[in-house]
Amino acid sequence: MNSSRASAGVQETPCGIQADLISPYQGRLVDLLEAGDAADELKAEAVRLPSVQLTPRSLSDLELLATGAFSPLDRFMGRADYLRVLGEMRLENGVLFPIPITLPVSDKNLPAHGLALALRDAHNNLVAVMRLDEVFEWDSREEAQQVFGTCDSRHPLVAEMSTWGGVCLSGPVQVLALPRYFDFPDLRLTPAQVRARLATMGWRNVVAFQTRNPLHRAHEEMTKRAAAKVNGTLLIHPAVGLTREGDVDHYTRVRIYQVAVETHYDPKRTLLSLIPLAMRMAGPREALWHAIIRRNYGANHLIVGRDHAGPGRDSRGRPFYAPDAARELVARHAPETGVQAVSFEELVYVPERDTYEEVSRVPAGVRSLSLSGTQVREEYLAIGKALPSWFTRPETAAILQAAYPPRRQQGFCVWFTGLSASGKSTTARVLAALLLARGRQVTVLDGDVVRTNLSRGLGFSREDRDTNILRIGFVASEIVRHHGAVICAAVSPYRAARDENRRLVGADKFIEVFMDTPLAVCEARDIKGLYAKARRGQLTGFTGIDDPYEEPLNSELRLETVHTSAEDNAKKILAHIQEGGFVQP
């Protein structure tokens, strides 16, 4: 069977090449796919194929399937595998596998079954050719409920999945080019390369450490104890594919890992390797998936933390998963995976002993210290305060402080949402003036202006509206990433698209402002006459009339505009921004 690259999350539409233009080449391509050893010929012939463009998530999955990290998978899941994974965490043949690895796409312009399809990266480079054996429909809400246990759009993957296509593809894949990386190439090891390195170290046991965060002293202590506990090698194996928006970028994290490993770990029993894993933040299921993946890299133990791969809190402010659920699931399946869970309670620093201890082992009355990730961001990095040496190594603190300036120099996004004529644009203009007066440079992305300059040609179907809102979100995320302030004012009627933009920008930098203006007031204010046209049937699909507006469930600010002026509302928003530290008092 040909090596396969499967991926989830393809969202681009296949190129629209007519079937009659490609049919003379299809027979030859299918023969080449079956032969499995004619990459150059496939590349030459594939230029005429219809294609799908893979997202970064897809490309990460593709690479890991190709290198064997997702073994026993060798292709995108077909319907039978997919459905059994959703319901039972098993492939059709009964093998344990808790996360669906699928290729969802738009159903437009697909070739007939048995014919070939090109897979391309974001730059349109050919990466693989697939023989299309199966096309099946899927339901994003059903998958979210089964895999994540929730349809709450505050879960980052629930929001993202709403942007994927409606059908999934399956079939054998011939990979023609792996992604090429220019950052940390010596650390990007395949499963076979990691297993070979581990074998030369000579330890029977290997404990893997999955992480998407910087390495602080508590992590250092935990990983060293884990290696001692199993009397084996430590594989520090950080995910450098898609993690969670708001996480420290992998460039900064890897520099921290490198310094820590070179300075504070035993080189005879420590291996640092990067994995281009696109995380799902699926909690217990993801922890079990991580165990299977690390088995393929040669580990027989996995450090499983409290709330492993958890996505934070839901729309009601509650954790998505119980703190010990991941440990319990990995431990339950250890006889089948061959990977044991290594767990520790929370480690806290005890000044009296100058050491880290599990919290339950600290005697009553003895002082202990700890910092949460939120405290690190809000109470130290955000205000330019040096991290304490008991918490993190000085070299780690220096890297973080260089990469993350104080909050007053960081970017943020204010996202106005509400019915047409609810006061979004007017309030946004006032807020922009107030921010400029406080020394912050501001970009305003108004819905009408964006429609004219960025989204010309889009209609008002739900798909086109989501496309427009996601384009605004993408531009906003880039402005924020470069430490700019951006104000977005668009109706943005659908909750899932707004939550996807929250994910894109980063939840800690996204301020959603709901302009809660009654429909009757909006109609009375409407100088464009759009509501009147919608009432007369001259406009269809108009938000608030014959198309729904989905109110935010948990916006940062909910403002009324009937008895409060735009200036007063803008001052309320400014106070919230100032409280968050983005503007100097």
Image (cartoon, rainbow, N blue to C red):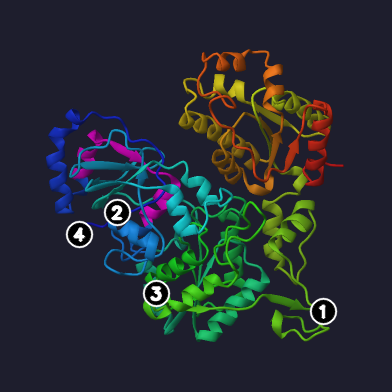
The kind of residue on which mark 4 rests is: Met
* Number of residues whose C-alpha sits closer than 10 Å to that of mark 4, classed few (under 14), some (14–19) or many (20 or more): few
The kind of residue on which mark 3 rests is: Gly
Instruction: Estimate the x, y position of residue 429 in percent, counting from the top left.
Output: 74, 25
The numbered disc on residue 367 is: 1
44 in the magenta segment:
yes
Q: Is residue 229 above or below residue 569?
A: below
Q: CA distance from mark 2 to mark 4?
A: 19 Å
Instruction: Estimate the x, y position of residue 70 in percent, counting from the top left.
Output: 36, 63
- Which secondary structure is most common in the magenta stretch? helix
Q: Which residue is mark 3?
A: 298
* Visible residue check, residue 412: no
Q: From which residue to which does the magenta span run? A: 41-63
Instruction: Estimate the x, y position of residue 26 in percent, counting from the top left.
Output: 16, 39
Q: Nearer the viewer, mark 2 or mark 3?
A: 2
Q: Which residue is mark 4?
A: 1
Disc nearer the start of the sequence (2/4):
4
Q: Nearer the viewer, mark 3 or mark 1?
A: 1
Outermost residue, right side: 585
Query: Which quadrant is the N terminus positioned in?
Result: bottom left
Instruction: Estimate the x, y position of residue 116 in percent, counting from the top left.
Output: 21, 42
Kind of element beneath mark 4: loop
The kind of residue on which mark 1 rests is: Arg
Marks 1 and 2 in Cβ contact (< 8 Å): no
Disc nearer the start of the sequence (4/1):
4
Disc nearer the start of the sequence (2/3):
2
Q: Is residue 272 above or below residue 563?
A: below
Q: CA distance from mark 1 to mark 2?
A: 56 Å
Disc nearer the start of the sequence (1/2):
2
